Amino acid sequence: MHIAVVGLNHRTTPVAVRERLAVAAGALSDVLWRFRRRPGVNECVLVSTCNRTEAYAAVEDSASRHMAEELARLGDIPPQELRNHLYSHLDETAVRHLLRVASGVDSMILGEPQVLGQVRAAYESALASGTTGAVLNRLFHTALETGKRVQTETEINRGAFSVGSAAVELARSIFGSLKGRRVLLLGAGKMSEIVARRLREEGAAGVIIANRTHERACTIAQQIGGRAVRYEDFETEMTVADIVIASTGAPHFIVRREQFERIMAARRMRPMFLIDIAVPRDIDPSIAEIDCAFLYDIDDLNGIVSRTAEGRQQAVEHAERIIEEHVREFMDWQRSLAAAPVIRGLQGRLRRIAEEELERYSRRLSSLDERQQALVRELAHSLVNKITHHPITHIKDYARSRGEEQLRTVVEVFGLDHEEDFPEADWRGDGI
């Protein structure tokens, strides 16, 4: 059994491709089972955020190719076209990759605390869908523990921005100051809440929030002293806004070109700055071609993001040491899985021999009373445990050090190559 990850992220893929592979929460269970049913995929978790879509799986040897094909199908993209954007990691490299993601080391925004919650949500969704098992359960518990340690024991997220915070920083860099500016937020999710709070801190005069669930918009508006409007009224609000920041969960554009042209005509072509941090995008990218429209998407935040990472190299090195510690612990555990069926086989074989010998000598022992016979039986099993103690210690060491030949020797020496000596698992199928 191997651990594999196949995916793409903000480093390998532009937002125009990433948005095609974004998975809505309501569709996640069906998508997980599409991956799970692929040949050789035994367990699966899908991490889908604005900056990455990654499939993690416990797999047989050839399954990574099937996972890549399923990602292409997910985005309705020809596999050959998607291949240049994909990365694929196996076993220790895959484990390290997940732990770096959960710790915020592999994020677009170094140390972004929201990523750990996204990894947890992805795992919980897979757990609820029934697509995980012993291997990925252990792996994701390790990832969550690692991410928590990195957040609490290092300063990697000191001064770290979220994507929403970076969007506000971009707006501030455009205007120099946000004091007196009218800002319209499209969407009222967690990201919009972060944006709204930062806007008020920067002194924006009016923060208007439009959301399909009006009650949610009202809640955020009340908390920050902003104003909520009905979702269907956002076009009217755009005619007077200086800045529009979009972050909804819509699967399609909510601001289309023809609609925006009407808005700009009503504004008499007064400039508007639009920042689209949604994936899939909320704002038609062709709007950038219109005079006096200045449109930025999530990939345009990279310059701001790189500045937030400056001066935190020591924290990154500390985080990487924590990550490597957990990678080693997990790999030791995974390799030890190869030992379990061999140990069960050895113990089962010797206990069976002991039982057979006790049965063979049962007539000679018949003169003993019940207590004495129990002592003889206890002695026989005690001898089995003592005989197997030293071999079991070495079997575990062989498994941890990838000693395939040594394990095969144990199987041959003790004659463990019969199916009944391997209850529940076959050591030859555990990836050693």
Image: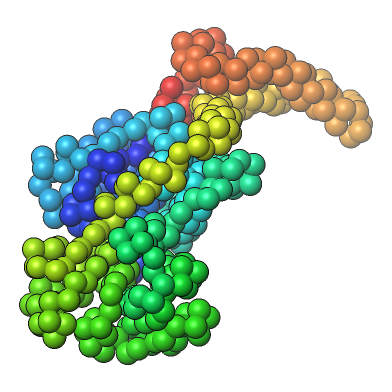
Q: Viewer-proximal residue, 148 or 198?
A: 198
Estimate the x, y position of residue 321 in percent, counting from the top left.
57, 29
Q: Is residue 131 left or right of residue 356?
A: left
Q: Is residue 1 visible?
A: no
Q: Residue at x 46, y 72 (%)?
A: 203
Q: Is residue 132 above or below residue 317?
A: below
User: Left of 367 or right of it: where is 100?
Assistant: left
Q: Quadrant of the C terminus?
A: top left
User: What colour scheme does the image use?
Assistant: rainbow
Q: Residue at x 20, y 75 (%)?
A: 254
The percent position of residue 191, horizontal first and vertical second, equals 41, 66
Q: Is residue 212 above or below residue 9?
A: below
Along the line of sight, the residue nearer the viewer: 357 or 308: 308
Q: The N terminus lies in which quarter of the figure?
A: top left
Side of 155 relative to 296 (left or right):
right
Residue 213 in the image: x percent, y percent? 37, 84
x, y (%) of residue 216?
43, 82
Image position of 423 (left or right of 299): right
Q: Residue sitting at 37 percent across and 82 percent down?
A: 208
Q: Is residue 424 above or below residue 289?
A: above
**Is the residue 211 above or below the residue 104 in the image?**
below
Quarter holding residue 322: top right
The residue at 13%/63% (across/down) is 288
Q: Give the number of callouts.
A: 0
Q: Is residue 264 visible?
A: yes
In terms of depth relative to the viewer, which is nearer, 372 or 423?
A: 423
> Which picture quadrant has residue 171?
bottom left
